[in-house]
Image: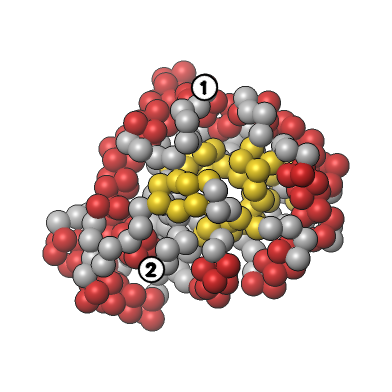
């Protein structure tokens, strides 16, 4: 099975389908910061053109680090970020923040941290249950119309929420939890595929592999001369043309392993064997 290696987000942002999730780049020391900068730069050297970050990842520190590592950004590099979450000093340490005025402030803050005049893909990290969806997406639509945002995306949404959001503004991407063994959001993926919306699975590498599932993944990996991680990423690329996996790591070696996945070719039999594993998950 041969899968396309690129996708046009929103119809015009062409990226390599296998991207990089920067969430794990959260340095605690100068030495760790240098290592994180090296990972980000190595990702671009290896041909990554889609990097995913968010205000939530270190409360802006992740965006700052990417700007330090990669600005001025090479042509064709898309850094997608997310807003809609604010830090708190109580509870889980965060709260929803979907009020239109707050979203505007968050976008301005992200522009400063990323050293950009325009965020080409701005995703709403979580819908705020206390704010009507038309108000939240309307604010992002207005920011798009003003030129501060190129395209609008969503994260962790249901089929109904996606439909309601699309009635307000064009949605270019959806970022939901999804992998070989966790396909709860298959209906959302199907809707994205029908509409040509990019689907960015977070936690794309199946976790908790054990027993028969682990053995079957390992068997396919041995057959194709790849690692189990590469096999589950290759399955995602084969499963739908709109899937853009964004595996994350703070290790150059792991990064290089992940990015080797788009060279893995699964046969129809291997793909079908892996697909059947979800029934046991």
- In the rendered image, residue 31, in percent from the top left (x then y), is placed at 41, 20
Q: Nearer the viewer, residue 74 or 28?
A: 74
How far is the residue under mark 1 from the one under mark 2?
A: 35 Å
Decide if residue 50 is on the left or right side of residue 4: right
Horizontal side of 7 relative to 148 (left or right) equals left
Q: Can you give x and y, in whole percent of width and height, for residue 139 in the image?
A: 81, 48
User: Which tag, 1 or 2, sits closer to the chain's start?
Assistant: 1
Secondary element under disc 2, as helix, strand or loop, is helix
Q: Residue furthest front?
A: 12
Question: Residue 15: x and y, percent?
Answer: 45, 46
**Camera-side residue of 130 and 3:** 3
Check residue 239 in the rendering and tell me which mark sits there, or answer none.
2
* Residue 102 vertical placement versus 7 (above, below): above
| Residue 48, label in figure | none
| For residue 95, side relative to residue 260 (left or right) | right
* Mark 1 residue element: loop
**Looking at the rendering, which quadrant does residue 221 occupy?**
bottom left
Residue 32's place in the image compared with 50, above or below, is: above
Going 58% across and 26% down the picture, which residue do you hit? 64
Against 41, residue 147 (above or below) is: below
Q: Is residue 249 left or right of residue 201?
A: left
Which residue in the structure is indicated by mark 1?
A: 72
């Amino acid at each position: 099975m041969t899968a396309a290696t690129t996708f046009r987000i929103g119809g015009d942002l062409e990226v390599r389908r296998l991207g990089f999730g920067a969430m794990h780049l959260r340095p605690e020391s100068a030495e760790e910061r240098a290592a994180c900068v090296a990972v980000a730069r190595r990702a671009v050297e290896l041909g990554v053109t889609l990097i995913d970050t968010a205000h939530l990842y270190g409360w802006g520190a992740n965006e700052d680090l990417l700007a330090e590592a990669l600005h001025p950004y090479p042509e064709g590099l898309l850094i997608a970020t997310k807003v809609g979450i604010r830090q708190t000093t109580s509870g889980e340490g965060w709260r929803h923040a979907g009020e239109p005025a707050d979203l505007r402030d968050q976008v301005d803050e992200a522009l400063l941290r990323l050293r950009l005049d325009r965020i080409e893909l701005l995703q709403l990290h979580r819908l705020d249950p206390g704010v009507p969806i038309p108000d939240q997406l309307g604010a992002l639509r207005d920011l798009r119309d003003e030129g501060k945002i190129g395209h609008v995306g969503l994260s962790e949404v249901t089929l109904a929420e996606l439909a309601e959001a699309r009635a307000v503004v064009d949605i270019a991407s959806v970022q939901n939890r999804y992998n070989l063994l966790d396909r709860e959001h298959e209906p959302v993926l199907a809707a994205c595929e029908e509409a040509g919306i990019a689907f960015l699975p977070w936690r794309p590498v199946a976790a908790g592999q054990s027993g028969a599932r682990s053995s079957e993944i390992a068997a396919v990996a041995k057959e194709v001369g790849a690692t189990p991680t590469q096999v589950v990423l290759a399955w995602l690329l084969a499963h739908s043309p709109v899937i853009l996996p964004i595996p994350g790591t703070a290790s150059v070696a792991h990064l290089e392993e992940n990015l080797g996945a788009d060279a893995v070719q699964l046969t129809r039999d291997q793909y079908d064997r892996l697909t059947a594993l979800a029934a046991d998950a």
